[in-house]
């Protein structure tokens, strides 16, 4: 297959679908922060702590929803979303500090502290969720994330965080070098080692909360480990490891998004992680080969080039096969079987749409972010032009209801019947 | 000096005559006008566990002090106190004329060579990167390494014999080579005081001897004051001006006179004669 066909399609989709465009921006920003931090995660062995913080976010989200969406501090629209995000961030920060504090004070070992705190936070989250059955549907989006659910506001927050963290890393590059080389040397040189450790934990916690939208809790730690680990296999030099981790992270995001756009129903988060994993495996094979054939030599440029070329090759094959397969089954033919709950969701959506009860839809969407995704996926399968799809998705994700023309509403509400 | 009780540091002082004959150390008070490290009556406890009890000694400029003692005797604690990483529970500890915990910029006047254990041998840094990190304390944010420093770094690397490894990753070096790297790193900021923690673990006898020779020559070349913790009593007694023996309390020995084996054995709580006899038969050279 001609690669330009696939690239053209992806390029066209990105330009015409704001959802994808926002997803791309968010993923690239997330990749920038995560890849940079992943170097420290690998060098300071913080992978498990990252995993722990990520999982404990469930408690934070459940608490946030309880407080701001259905509880005492009821808010609407972006305010509710912000409330949930802030609650989650604060919750994760506290868990991160508690893990750091208990292991530093030698109350228990670090791995035990992580195990205890993240399980307890998750249990707390599950208990809260059980109290409010209404938003169990969130769980899937929470676990695996979705590029489609990213809003413009999310991008601004991610950009802000990326700016803060990257500035911090650049400003304190030397201090962080000494800190990751040896904490004893660092404190002998007068560095506030504990402060640096907690700052790193906090950066980790905030990054996880922000990246969770795109990648979900289960996958976000992959982003915080794999780029650094892969780059470490390719270079012995401290500065190069940052550059390489960022390049590889960026390529994984591009590859993952491209694949998930080309192949129908491929979720973006897991695809990106698999792309990273692929690069890691290639780098492992390369480093084994290098150890045997060119002992003691670094060969960074050759190794990195090799990893990237092989990765792109595999990516191309996967995309061609997937694209061909989705063409033959017909991209828009059969919507997947819907559950009854989805059926009623859709019916509700259509009837509210026809009655112009946008605030009703909006209220439902805010109480349940995954609803937006369900609707979004459904809309992507409809016989609409890309511009029309984009308009409807914008309405759902950005609350731009007044953009919808009567004709379009009519079209959307009638289409499902034709298909079934 | 035959009878040393561990609980009372003054018991190890010896006679007044002995004290006066030593121009380096005052066990019971710190009166050296030229003292770089002055430890007065310092005690330190981890929680309720007393690690050091009423330690008093003084390290004059350009002296080399060897610290020996059994594991858990408080050697590393003492170094951490001198480095200002711990604050004494009681007593007073001055380094370079200031409280050790409030050294601020003077900290770059202390070169520290850690016990090798903490460093990840897969760490992605070249030997040169590690050595240059010794200057970080003297550089402003984003300031590039001045040409003068760069020259100094290569000069020192030649002197300690690590320039051949300059671009190799730190993890590829042997233990002995890594020690030289960390010595070089400690010296690039031109310190007055060099603190070396347990440098000989994992190094063979010949390597240990070379290491002590290196310290000896560097010390003369740069007029360094050195405090070194080691289990190699033999080498330490050869090169140090005096030894302090730590086992919660401090016992002191001037290497200008024969080693008081009895005292050291009492501190270690075991027979050491077999290890040190060889040193005795060879006699001293200073």
Image (cartoon, helix red, strand yellow):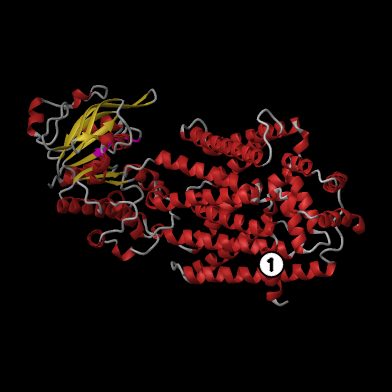
Position of B27 relative to A310 (above/below):
above
Q: Is residue A66 visible?
A: yes
Position of A321 relative to B23 (above/below):
below
Looking at the rendered structure, the number of numbered marks drawn on it comes to: 1
Displayed quadrant of residue B195: top left
Element class at badge 1: helix
Badge 1: few (under 14), some or many (20 or more) residues near its Cα, within 10 Å? some
* Residue at (29% x, 61% y) in the render: B162
> Closest to the observer: A66 or A320?
A66
Q: Is residue B233 visible?
A: no
Q: Which residue is mark 1?
A: A10
> Closest to the observer: A86 or A410?
A410
Quadrant where the image shows the N terminus of chain A: bottom right
Is B283 included in the stretch rendered in magenta?
A: no
Q: Main secondary structure of the magenta part?
A: loop
Quadrant where the image shows the C terminus of chain A: bottom right
Q: Position of residue A228 (x, y in %)?
A: 52, 56
Span shown in magenta: B67-71
Q: Position of residue B269 (x, y in %)?
A: 30, 30
Q: Position of residue B102 (x, y in %)?
A: 27, 35
* Residue at (83% x, 70% y) in the render: A328
Side of A304 relative to B144 (left or right): right
Side of A249 relative to B57 (left or right): right
* Residue at (50% x, 64% y) in the render: A234
Q: Give me the chain letter of mark 1.
A: A
Position of A233 relative to A190 (above/below):
below
Is B70 included in the stretch rendered in magenta?
A: yes
Q: Position of residue B267 (x, y in %)?
A: 27, 30
Side of B88 relative to B119 (left or right): left
Displayed quadrant of residue B167: bottom left
């Amino acid at each position: 297959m001609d690669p330009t066909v696939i690239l053209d399609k992806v390029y066209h989709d990105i330009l015409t679908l704001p959802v994808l465009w926002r997803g791309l921006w968010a993923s690239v920003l997330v990749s920038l922060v995560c890849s940079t931090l992943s170097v420290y995660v690998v060098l300071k062995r913080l992978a498990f702590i990252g995993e722990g913080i990520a999982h404990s976010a469930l408690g934070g989200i459940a608490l946030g929803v309880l407080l701001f969406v259905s509880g005492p501090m009821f808010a609407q629209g972006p305010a509710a979303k912000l409330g949930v995000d802030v609650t989650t961030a604060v919750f994760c920060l506290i868990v991160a500090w508690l893990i750091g504090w208990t292991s530093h004070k030698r109350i228990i070992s670090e791995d035990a502290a992580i195990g205890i705190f993240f399980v307890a936070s998750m249990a707390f989250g599950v208990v809260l969720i059980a109290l409010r059955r209404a938003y169990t549907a969130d769980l899937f989006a929470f676990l695996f994330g979705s590029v489609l659910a990213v809003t413009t506001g999310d991008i601004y927050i991610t950009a802000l965080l990326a700016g803060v963290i990257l500035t911090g890393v650049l400003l304190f590059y030397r201090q962080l070098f000494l800190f990751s080389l040896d904490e004893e040397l660092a404190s002998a040189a007068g560095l506030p080692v504990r402060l640096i450790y907690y700052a790193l934990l906090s950066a980790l916690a905030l990054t996880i909360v922000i990246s969770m939208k795109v990648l979900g809790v289960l996958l976000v730690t992959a982003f915080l480990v794999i780029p650094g680990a892969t780059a470490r296999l390719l270079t012995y030099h401290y500065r190069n490891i940052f550059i390489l981790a960022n390049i590889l992270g960026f390529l994984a995001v591009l590859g993952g998004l491209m694949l998930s756009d080309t192949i129908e129903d491929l979720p973006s988060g897991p695809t990106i992680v698999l792309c990273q994993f692929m690069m890691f495996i290639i780098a492992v094979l390369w480093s084994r080969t290098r150890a045997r054939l060119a002992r003691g030599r670094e060969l960074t440029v050759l190794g990195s080039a090799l990893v990237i070329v092989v990765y792109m090759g595999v990516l191309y094959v996967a995309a061609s096969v997937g694209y061909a397969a989705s063409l033959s089954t017909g991209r828009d033919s059969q919507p997947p079987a819907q559950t009854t709950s989805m059926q009623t969701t859709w019916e509700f959506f259509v009837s509210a749409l026809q009655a112009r009860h946008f605030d009703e839809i909006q209220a439902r969407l805010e109480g349940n972010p995954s609803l937006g995704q369900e609707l979004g996926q459904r809309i992507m399968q409809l016989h609409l032009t890309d511009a029309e799809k984009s308009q409807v998705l914008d309405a759902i994700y950005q609350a731009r209801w007044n953009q919808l023309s009567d004709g379009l509403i009519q079209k959307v509400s009638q289409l499902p019947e034709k298909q079934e | 000096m035959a009878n040393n009780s561990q609980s009372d540091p003054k018991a190890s002082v010896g006679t007044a005559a002995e004290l006066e004959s030593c121009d380096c150390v005052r066990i019971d008070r710190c009166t050296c006008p030229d003292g770089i490290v002055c430890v007065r009556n310092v005690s330190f406890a981890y929680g309720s566990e007393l690690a050091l009890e009423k330690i008093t000694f003084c390290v004059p400029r350009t002296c080399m002090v060897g610290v020996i003692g059994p594991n858990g005797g408080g050697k590393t604690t003492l170094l951490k106190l001198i480095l200002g990483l711990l604050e004494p529970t009681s007593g007073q500890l001055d380094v370079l004329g200031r409280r050790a915990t409030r050294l601020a910029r003077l900290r770059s006047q202390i070169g520290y060579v850690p016990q090798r254990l903490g460093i990840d041998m897969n760490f992605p840094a070249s030997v040169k990167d590690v050595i240059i990190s010794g200057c970080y304390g003297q550089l402003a944010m984003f300031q590039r390494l001045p040409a003068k420093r760069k020259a100094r770094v290569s000069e020192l690397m030649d002197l300690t014999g690590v320039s051949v490894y300059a671009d190799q990753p730190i993890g590829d070096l042997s233990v002995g080579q890594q020690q030289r790297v960390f010595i070089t790193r400690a010296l690039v900021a031109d310190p007055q005081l060099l603190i070396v923690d347990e440098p000989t673990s994992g190094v063979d006898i010949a390597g240990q001897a070379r290491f002590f020779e290196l310290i000896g020559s560097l010390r003369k070349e740069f007029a360094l004051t050195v405090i070194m913790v080691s289990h190699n009593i033999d080498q330490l007694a050869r090169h140090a001006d005096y030894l302090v023996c730590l086992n919660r309390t401090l016992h002191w020995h001037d290497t200008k006179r024969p080693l008081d084996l009895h005292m050291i054995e009492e501190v270690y709580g075991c027979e050491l004669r077999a290890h040190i006899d060889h040193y005795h038969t060879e006699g001293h050279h200073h």
